[in-house]
Image (spheres, helix red, strand yellow):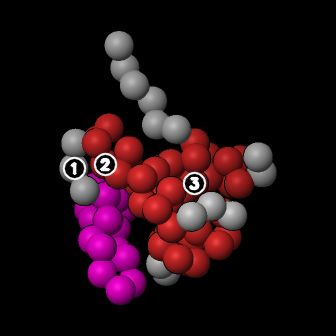
Amino acid sequence: MIKHPDYRALQALDTVIRERGFERAAQKLCITQSAVSQRIKQLENLFGQPLLVRTILPQPTEQGQKLLALLQSSGITRRAMAW
């Protein structure tokens, strides 16, 4: 059975990059910083590899960049933000 990523996890990844940090992403999403981290970890477990380099300003890995490009081109994150 194929597992699909949770929209909230995709939204968290997109927001961390856009807001340049976990704390700002948490504020934007009205959730805790821990919840943001857990959602991204859920995605990383699903894809089997890191999607972010966790530094002061988180950066997407190569796989993370590919996923973000796909999300942005498909409009998935914009639809998720509307929820």
Q: Which residues are magenta?
A: 51-66
The residue under the point 69% across, 64% down is 30
The residue under the point 46% across, 37% down is 5
Q: What is the spatial separation of the Cα atoms under label 1 and label 3, in whole angstroms? A: 18 Å
For the residue pair 25 and 33, the one nearer the viewer reads as 33
Q: Of label 1 and label 2, which has the lower sequence position?
A: 2
**Hey, which residue is sitting farthest right in the picture?**
82
| Label 1 neighbour load within 10 Å: few <14, some 14-19, many 20+ | few
Counting from the top left corner in percent of width and height, residue 77 is at 62, 52
The residue under the point 51% across, 67% down is 33
- Residue under label 1, please give it: 49
Quarter assignment of residue 52: bottom left
Residue type marked 1: Gln
Counting from the top left corner in percent of width and height, residue 4 is at 45, 30
Q: Are marks 2 and 3 in contact (CB under 8 Å)?
A: no
Q: Of label 2 and label 3, which has the lower sequence position?
A: 3
- Residue under label 3, please give it: 11
For the residue pair 67 and 29, the one nearer the viewer reads as 29
| Residue 71 part of the magenta-drawn span | no
Q: Is residue 76 left or right of residue 39?
A: right
Q: Of label 1 and label 3, which has the lower sequence position?
A: 3
Above or below, 15 against 75 in this view is: below
| Label 3 neighbour load within 10 Å: few <14, some 14-19, many 20+ | many
Counting from the top left corner in percent of width and height, residue 21 is at 47, 78
Q: Are marks 1 and 2 in contact (CB under 8 Å)?
A: yes
- Residue under label 2, please give it: 44
The residue under the point 27% across, 71% down is 53
- The N terminus - image quarter: top left
